[in-house]
């Protein structure tokens, strides 16, 4: 499948690439507002509250972790299960309240584990937890899979004092099942909605994590990305998402796609909260050898980089090609002006065409690595199916429930692949991974850049379970994904009453500098908008 077809089909490992929307509405500043939309009243006392504010209220005795946890659980019942029925949470943790009570008891004794102590978070349903919750990747074939051990990053969350509220829905198998998939849909969890306009797509594959954070169902969430799965849902749901350098966070205990590109990442409403979450997730894990490479490169506290003047003197590269849509173009010019006003120098560069030429190689790498990784995961865990072949058979035997609209042709393509020592795989890996690194390294060195910027995605496309996702030409997930480099997206504004995020990415282990840049932009623009759960563009 050619890269352009691959992208438009929605199969980029978990990445939603939404099409530009052409609904007719009125124009006001950088917002395109539909004339008639039914909205839902939303009064919630924890709306838009930050991790720091929650900690302060617990310190003052205004809230306890138990109270906060109860409020979020009620919020999920009111708005995720009922009301607008966003459907972002696939399973609640029956131990959440008990955990919160235990953390409150620790606080009373003067023990505070850190900034996440007593803070409710959600995690994606492809991350192992050794508790009463399942880990299914959204697949009915995985029903009953209760891992014997926590994923490494889950252990880090528990050690930091986070309250695991539950697990979020996702695009089934991290959107690596079919070329005609609908992002945010899984056979176990159903369809997640975009909380801004409910008949629009939340993007994938960390759809539930993105929608839940945007809708104020938790303080923050963890997603996973192979190519766009954190950054796309963050962008179209109006939140901050960080895709770290591959290897900064352990992948052990996470259902895999690509050992070369997979990583977990924090998703939050502010850069500061995302930095807090990133700080506790890092660590060297003997079960994920790539984290050994990151040893000594992680920062214990990424909030140290929260600098309002972080853009001063920075050189930011932007692709020379302009956005064709007038509203996207206008909003981007506004964003560039903000970067300049904050002291950054904008440098026009050309690199995206070269990156996009590597797309076929990236796809081949994913297919080889998925077969290797998923067979190992299934054989090592308590899942009902023990191999990719058994998974394909289960889906075929239960196609009315598992494949009501789109099929599993990607799984079928993967099952016939050879091992990771094959010439075809090694050639594709060299081209995709090393090639993308060279392109980015060269353009950054030649232009003395601190980061490269551009819009992460266009606004969310409509959800279409029959024909699948319809992506446009605005996306910036591949460069950082293929190279394994860090990437952060921050709200930049609204188009057609839907969020658009701006991306910043750089070289390996530059998370701190990207947080500095993103925080400076965020504080200057403050473009995070609380969703209104609008029913539709249509009157």
Image (spheres, rainbow, N blue to C red):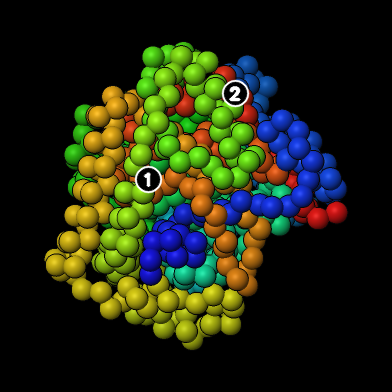
Q: Earlier in the sequence, mark 2 or mark 1?
A: 1
Label 1 sits on residue: 352
Note whether residue 312 is visible.
yes
Q: Residue at x 34, y 80 (%)?
A: 389
The residue nearer to you, when weighing 510 against 444, is: 444
Left of 514 or right of it: where is 39? right
User: Residue 252: horizontal and vertical position, in percent?
Assistant: 30, 52
Quarter of the figure with the N terminus? bottom left
Query: Residue 397's x, y, as percent?
Result: 49, 86
Res 96 seen here: no
Answer with the quarter of the image where residue 25 lies.
top right
Indicate the quadrant where residue 258 lies.
bottom left
Residue at 67% across / 55% down in the picture?
200
Q: Secondary structure at mark 2?
A: helix
Residue in the foreground of this view, choosing between 143 and 451? 451
Please tell me the numbered disc located at residue 525: 2
- Tell which of 87 and 330 is nearer to you: 330
Of the numbered discs in the image, which one, if any, rests on residue 344?
none
Question: How dense is the environment of label 2, judged by Cα within 10 Å: few (below 14), some, or many (20 and up)?
Answer: some
Horizontal side, residue 172 vs residue 216: left or right: left
Q: Residue furthest bottom?
A: 397
C-alpha distance separating marks 2 and 1: 26 Å
Q: SS at mark 1?
A: helix
């Amino acid at each position: 499948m050619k890269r352009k077809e691959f992208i438009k089909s929605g199969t980029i490992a978990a990445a939603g690439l939404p099409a530009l929307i052409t609904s007719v509405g009125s124009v006001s500043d950088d917002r395109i507002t539909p004339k008639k939309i039914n909205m839902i009243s939303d009064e919630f006392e924890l709306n838009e509250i930050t991790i720091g504010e929650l900690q302060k209220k617990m310190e003052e005795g205004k809230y306890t972790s138990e109270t906060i946890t109860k409020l979020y659980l009620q919020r999920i019942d009111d708005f995720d299960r009922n009301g607008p029925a966003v459907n972002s949470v696939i399973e609640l943790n029956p131990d959440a309240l008990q955990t919160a009570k235990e953390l409150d008891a620790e606080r009373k004794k003067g023990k505070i584990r850190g900034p996440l102590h007593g803070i409710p978070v959600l995690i994606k349903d492809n991350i192992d937890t050794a508790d009463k919750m399942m880990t299914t990747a959204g697949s009915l074939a995985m029903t009953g899979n209760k891992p014997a051990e926590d994923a490494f990053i889950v252990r880090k969350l528990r050690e930091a004092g986070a309250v695991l509220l539950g697990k979020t829905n996702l695009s089934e198998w991290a959107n690596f099942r079919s070329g005609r998939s609908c992002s945010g849909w899984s056979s176990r969890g159903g369809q997640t909605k975009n909380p801004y306009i409910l008949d629009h797509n939340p993007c994938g594959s960390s759809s539930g994590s993105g929608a839940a954070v945007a809708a104020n169902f938790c303080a923050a969430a963890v997603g996973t990305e192979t190519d766009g799965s954190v950054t796309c849902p963050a962008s179209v749901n109006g939140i901050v998402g960080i895709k770290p350098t591959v290897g900064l966070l352990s992948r052990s205990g996470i259902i895999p796609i690509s050992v070369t590109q997979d990583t977990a990442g924090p998703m939050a409403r502010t850069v500061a909260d995302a930095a807090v979450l990133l700080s506790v997730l890092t660590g060297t894990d003997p079960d994920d050898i790539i984290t050994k490479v990151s040893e000594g490169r992680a920062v214990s506290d990424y909030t140290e980089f929260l600098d309002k003047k972080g853009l001063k003197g920075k050189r930011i590269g932007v692709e020379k090609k302009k956005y064709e849509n007038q509203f996207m173009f206008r909003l981007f010019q506004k964003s560039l002006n903000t970067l300049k006003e904050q002291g950054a120098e904008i440098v026009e560069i050309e690199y995206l065409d070269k990156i996009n030429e590597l797309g076929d190689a990236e796809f081949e790498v994913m297919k080889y690595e998925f077969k290797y990784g998923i067979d190992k995961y299934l054989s090592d865990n308590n899942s009902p199916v023990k191999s990719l072949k058994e998974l394909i058979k289960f889906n075929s035997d239960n196609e009315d429930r598992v494949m009501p609209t789109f099929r599993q042709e990607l799984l079928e393509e993967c099952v016939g692949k050879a091992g990771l020592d094959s010439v075809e795989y090694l050639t594709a890996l060299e081209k995709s991974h090393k090639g993308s690194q060279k392109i980015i390294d060269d353009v950054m060195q030649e232009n003395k850049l601190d980061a490269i910027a551009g819009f992460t995605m266009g606004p969310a496309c409509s959800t279409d379970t029959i024909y699948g996702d319809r992506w446009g030409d605005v996306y910036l997930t591949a460069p950082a994904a293929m190279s394994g480099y860090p990437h952060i997206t921050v709200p930049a504004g609204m188009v057609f009453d839907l969020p658009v995020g701006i991306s910043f990415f750089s070289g390996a282990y530059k998370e701190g500098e990207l947080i500095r840049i993103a925080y400076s932009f965020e504080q200057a623009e403050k473009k995070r908008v609380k969703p209104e759960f609008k029913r539709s563009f249509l009157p």
